[in-house]
Amino acid sequence: MKFMSMLNKRPSTVNRQPSTAITVLIILLSACSTKPDPYKTWKTVNGNPSGNKYSSLNEIDTSNVKQLTVAWTYHTGDADTAAHSQIQCNPIIINGILFGTSPQQKLFALDASTGKEIWKYKPFDSVPGGKGMYFGLNSNRGVAYWTDGADDERLFYTAGPFLRAVNAKTGKAIDSFGINGKVDLREGLGVDASDLFVTATSAPTVYKDLVLTGTRVSESMDAAPGHIRAYNVRTGKQEWIFHTIPYPGEEGYDSWEDKNAWKMTGGANNWMGMIIDQKTGIAYIPLGSASMDFYGGKKRGADLFADCMVALDANTGKKIWHYQYIHHDTWDWDPSSAPVLLTVRHNGNDIDAVAQTTKTGFIFLFNRANGEPLFPIVETPEDTVTGLVGEKLSPTQPIPQKPAAFVRQSFTEKDLNPYLSPEEFADVKAKLAGYHTGTLFKPESKEGTIIFPGFDGGAEWGGPAVDPSDATLYINANEMAWILKMIEINNNAKANENNSTAGQRLYVQNCMSCHGADRKGSGNYPSILDEDKKMNKDQFIQFVGAGRRMMPAFTFLKPEEKEAIAAYVLDLKSELNKPFHHELSELEKFRQVPYTISGYNKFLSKSGLPALSPPWGTLTAIDLNSGDVKWKTVLGEDSAFAGRPQTGTENYGGPVITAGGLLFIAATKDRKIRAFNKRTGELLWETPLPNSGFATPATYEINGKQFVVIACGGGKLKTSSGDSYVAFALSK
């Protein structure tokens, strides 16, 4: 009021100097007007440090989006169709330079206005085992950038088991970081993980002079622990570690019935990425399930901090708060993406919040400072009868009361696909009658349990977008039923066992869950029936030890075990009758479980069509102030059902929203990128891509011109693999 009264006083002369108060006000207004817009650039994965995938750019809007055309296309040149290669990268753009990764995890820099390559960094020195077999090759979803504000500019990402530091100007490894520019993520975990599969699919996260990272590990009993670590950005020195499976004396240790879990069990890892509040220094880190995914007899208890959101002090790694989404997870329903920071209007107050979408279709919304849920969450009694020896499920699970789930969560006869032929409909109906189904947390079983939403969600690793102006969350989701069937394992080696019987036994223990009992593959995992035509024994053994993308490296297997599996899978007549003998260590005995799964099998008809009624892909807008749905629409079209109402398709990758009123998303099996009106859900524009864009787009501006770019790697859902990044802009 004092400022306003002074402003209303007329000066006595034209030459009079402004008052002190007016000068202060002018300075304040000037400071506000020059404050940088955090949403105008795309300097981090998911756009900005809040992870909301929002851009304030508005050159492209609802009135002109139909005028988008291809501005440039960049080909990485290293797609591998035979290996089902993919690109899942959300690129970043720094000072007009686009940084992304290729199917073979090469890091590159492009002129973001033309797509012209500036440099390329190759992380692997050699290609073991022949074409298409790259050591430790993992899917990569992005890179992180750090600068000292002067001349030092660095990019961080993981390829194989190594966190790597690369000079952003030259594309050369920074030798002073770790050893020759890389840190081995298998080291510094507190256990010997030298023979275990450890990598990272998500980009690390930078805070001050620290780079924080989680890991992707095996999902079986051979999993390394998923501890969170921070490294010095200059030297690569490990500065701190947070034990996601607590040590004796640490909080959460008593949540495990097996008091040796801290040194025997793995998982509870951050494979999906994290978000750090750059103002408060709090890291919000979702953690996955403990090993193994589907049988919990070796992880009895609540299993902290598996399936939790943990809030850590990014400076020290000390825990501030945590919340567990699922107790004793046997459904592989860990949180599916990095969370998002936002501000909501709740009970009349503005609350800084953190939101987490999940595979189950729930959204958890917490007070960022203390972890208090902003909507009620009720511990709800659940069925615990499995019929499996040693299993002990949690009697309750936390169920958010709001927002409502954004996908269906129950599959009964009324949900069968009405577009199947009468014969196929009758067949899937009869099969459904023999499965355990009807509720979300139905226990695993030997007869088969319907997992719905599926193993991939609900929400998946693309994660949501959030509009900071009104706290609207936009989430794309899958709706696909899968079958979880537990198979008993014979862990006992026979006297005078040979490679034939040992190879089959070891295949069931280590390989069947992905490649199926008939070796024809399951889910996104390929058939290996004709592997003998692709590689010889030595190549196969090297491949098993190295791993590739979805397949972990089975380095923990002894040479004689790999040889037995090779003899069985490749049907090596001369090797099958060789004697097999192997003494088990204490750890190897612990890793043996009485059950595995029959495979990652979707509930399909005999001709391969979904047993579930559509839609199989959706896009939903939810007001997080009120928890109410604003609109919902179908995402994608399945060509097998042409002429039917739009079906949607399974989808991988997230949305981007803009101040121009748009939501951009690719992600679908049908090889298209689309733009929707973010306020209404109306489809405004779509165009085909060279290959499916199973990634999140990025949008950026060069000299006043707005671009939208998407990685088109294909390779999932039995689609062809590609090697391109395609950028769109308005045609003028």
Image (tube, helix red, strand yellow):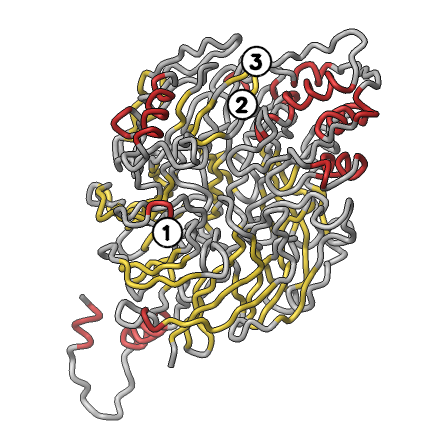
Look at the numbered disc 1 and give the secondary structure of its residue. strand
Q: Are marks 2 and 1 in contact (CB under 8 Å)?
A: no
Q: Are marks 3 and 2 in contact (CB under 8 Å)?
A: no
The first of marks 3 and 2 along the sequence is 3
Mark 2 and mark 1: span between their CA atoms? 35 Å
Quarter of the figure with residue 377 = top left
Q: Nearer the viewer, mark 2 or mark 1?
A: 2
User: Residue shown at 47%/60% (left/top)?
Assistant: 710
- Residue 543, compared with residue 88, is above or below; it is above
Residue 207 appears in the figure: no
Mark 3 and mark 1: span between their CA atoms? 42 Å
Q: Which residue is mark 2?
A: 598
Q: Which residue is mark 3?
A: 488
Q: Are marks 3 and 1 in contact (CB under 8 Å)?
A: no
Amino acid type assigned to the residue bearing label 2 in the image: Ser
User: Residue shown at 36%/24% (left/top)?
Assistant: 427
- Residue 276, compared with residue 37, is above or below; it is above
Q: Which residue is mark 1?
A: 465
